[in-house]
Image (cartoon, rainbow, N blue to C red):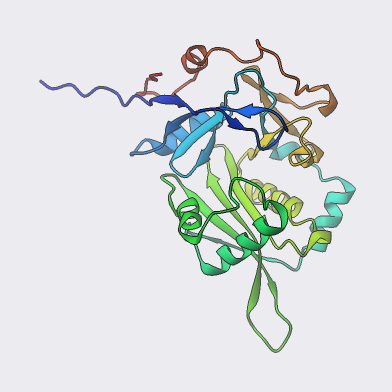
Amino acid sequence: MRHTLPIAPQFYVTAPQPCPYLEGRMERKLFTALQGDRAERLNDALSKQGFRRSQNVLYRPSCAECSACLSARIRVADFEPSRSQARTWKRNSYLQREATSPWATEAQYSLFRRYLDSRHADGGMADMDIFEFAAMIEETPVRSRVIEYSAPLPEPSRRRKLTAVCLTDVLDDGLSMVYSFYDPDLTRQSLGTYIILDHVQIAREAGLPYVYLGYWVPGSAKMGYKSNFSALEIYKHGRWQPIGDPARHSSELHPLSVDPIAEQVARISLPDGMRSAG
């Protein structure tokens, strides 16, 4: 009789490279492939443990001397918008939302390029061509949606102008905002904030308890906005906890701030029928 061994996710570590969030630091990621008929279960399980998805890979920071990057999520039931966020919600009420299958379009790529050129011209995605963009959107082994936001064009046109886009994964306990971009000319609209607020609304309507925002990094101006949302939790010391006062979280370097890779992998909780391998 033949016996099939349980699928064992293999975990790897990237080579160090310059950190995109904190100047002068080096980043390193722990990652595993996301594939096969168990991909959704693995994505659900590891997202609850601080991992993020990029195409068919799950990863989380595992820097040698730094543990500043903290996965963040909003508790939907307890979220209350601030006055500023309420104004942002009202200001963008003219936008129309449409959820589609994860297919890339020329309109999306055009908006993506304008966003990068204006906001992240020196970032790691700056040279992404249309084929790489299509891979980012379409290469997903899990339940994903592209959420598009469009504005009406002046009459007599009946067409609408694509204004913002978010690639979103649907988890068993929430929505994971994989990547979003928007019209860089509409600075006063606070579109990045609006997209998050709308995802909270979508999750609430779907009965999902969380909206996963990616990483919050104390000391990073790029990621500071995430701490402005109420009911925010961070994944720290192996558990989710309320963020509390953002100022109490340190981004200082320390040689003992990160456990050895083997210990990190050993503590990862996998779905039934899977077992990890370093």
In front here: 182 or 40? 182
276 left or right of 152 in image: left
* Image quadrant containing the N terminus: top left
Task: Say which quarter of the image contains residue 37.
Answer: top left
Q: Position of residue 235 (x, y in %)?
A: 65, 25
62 left or right of 234 in image: left
Task: Say which quarter of the image contains residue 9.
Answer: top left
Q: Position of residue 192 (x, y in %)?
A: 73, 52
Compared with 129, 47 (above or below) is above
9 left or right of 188 in image: left
Residue at x 84% of width, y 52% of height: 86
Residue at x 86% of width, y 45% of height: 82
Q: Position of residue 255 (x, y in %)?
A: 66, 12
Compared with 98, 213 (above or below) is above
Q: How many marks?
A: 0
Q: Where is residue 158 in the image (x, y as percent from the top left)?
A: 64, 83
* Image quadrant containing the C terminus: top left
Q: Which residue lies furthest to the bottom in this view?
A: 156
Q: Residue furthest left?
A: 1
Whether residue 271 can be seen here = no
Task: Say which quarter of the image contains residue 153.
Answer: bottom right
Compared with 256, 153 (above or below) is below
Whether residue 101 can be seen here = yes
Residue at x 51% of width, y 56% of height: 133
Residue at x 57% of width, y 69% of height: 107
